[in-house]
Image: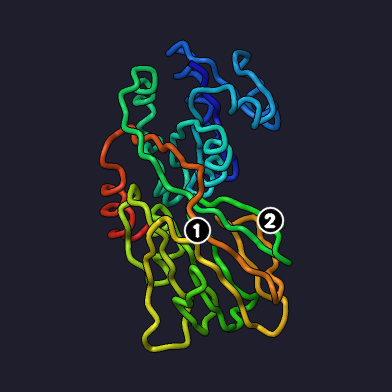
Amino acid sequence: MKIVLSPNFSKKNALSTALKCCDILKELDMDVFVSENFRSEFGEKTFVQFGKIEEITKECDTVIAIGGDGTILKASAYASEYDKPLLGINTGRLGFMASMEIEDLDKLSKLKEQDYIIETRMMIDAELVRDGKVVDLHTALNDVVIARPYSKIADYEISTDGIVVSSMRSDGMVFATPTGSTAYALSAGGPILEPETECIQLTPICPHSLFSRTMVFTSDRLLEVRHYAGDDSVYYSVDGRARCILQQNDRLVIKKSLKKLRLIDIKGHSFFDAVNNKLMNPIK
């Protein structure tokens, strides 16, 4: 069995956790692969193999992300590209999508036994259409955020099948998957959605209205966004990265992606545990 480790060494305890994972996986007779960018960190582990992250992910059986939610989001991009299951080990503060904490490393044996649950998570595409052509495409596990710098307000129009479904004046908006409903969308006032449902959630950011609320669309909707800011200062970002400028006449199309992420829940009921333990209680 081939395992790719994807750590984020800016997180506390990520290096020590990654090295412990290496030893445990070796004892389980699994092959360990790591990006060639981390040769110096894993140099003492002579059994670890290195390569380009895309190539080793394509050939592996499972990806293990070690860090926080941002680490899992980054790993999800190439795990979903090659349809590989992803396991998150939390060494960050929240780690909402992680199935394991540092003290749970003994449960890595369940990977070999295939004693775990696979949660299939919907993803969304953001297509930038300019002059009738798609000029940019990014896929999100969490969300696509449209906003202006310095919290400047703008007018936005959202339509589907040529019908306007919402017009708003706001600081921006969040198009979230059910997985992303517990991220920025939650902070903006949106509801929590069970992550294995399939829908697209639209939550305005600081709307200048008494009645603007979150809207939830079926997953087969193609949602088209136009902005009226009077300039090209509106941008969109995908999972907190891939920031792109929306020009005045651009259209941004949000739709369900053909890609999906297979997320490993190694302990069971991790989502509801996370809601109770990580959202209901203050972060220490």
Quarter of the figure with residue 243: bottom right
For image coordinates 43% across by 48% down, the residue present is 122
Q: Amino acid at mark 2?
A: Asp
Q: How is the image coloured?
A: rainbow
Quarter of the figure with residue 134: bottom right
How many neighbours does mark 2 have within 10 angstroms: few (below 14), some (14-19), or many (20 or more)?
A: few
The C terminus, quarter of image: bottom left
> Helix or strand or loop: what does disc 2 sit on?
strand
Q: Amino acid at mark 1?
A: Asp
First in sequence, mark 2 or 1: give its number: 2
Query: Depth-wise, is mark 2 or mark 1 nearer the camera?
Result: 2
Q: Which is nearer the eye, 92 or 111?
A: 111
Quarter of the figure with residue 47: top right
State the image coordinates of residue 198 (x, y, percent, origin top left): 37, 52
Name the residue beneath numbered marker 2: 136
For image coordinates 42% across by 68% down, the residue present is 187
State the image coordinates of residue 46 (x, y, percent, origin top left): 63, 14
Rendered position, 121 above or below 45: below
> Helix or strand or loop: what does disc 1 sit on?
strand
For image coordinates 43% across by 37% down, the residue present is 262
For image coordinates 45% across by 19% down, the residue present is 24
Q: Which is nearer the eye, 151 or 219?
A: 219
State the image coordinates of residue 144 (x, y, percent, origin top left): 54, 61
Question: How many marks overall?
Answer: 2
In the orientation shown, which residue stands out farthest toward the front? 162
Residue 185 - label:
none
Name the residue beneath numbered marker 1: 143
State the image coordinates of residue 10 (x, y, percent, origin top left): 59, 45
Q: CA distance from mark 2 to mark 1?
A: 16 Å
Q: Which is nearer the eye, 227 or 191?
A: 227
How many neighbours does mark 1 have within 10 angstroms: few (below 14), some (14-19), or many (20 or more)?
A: many
Rendered position, 93 above or below 250: above
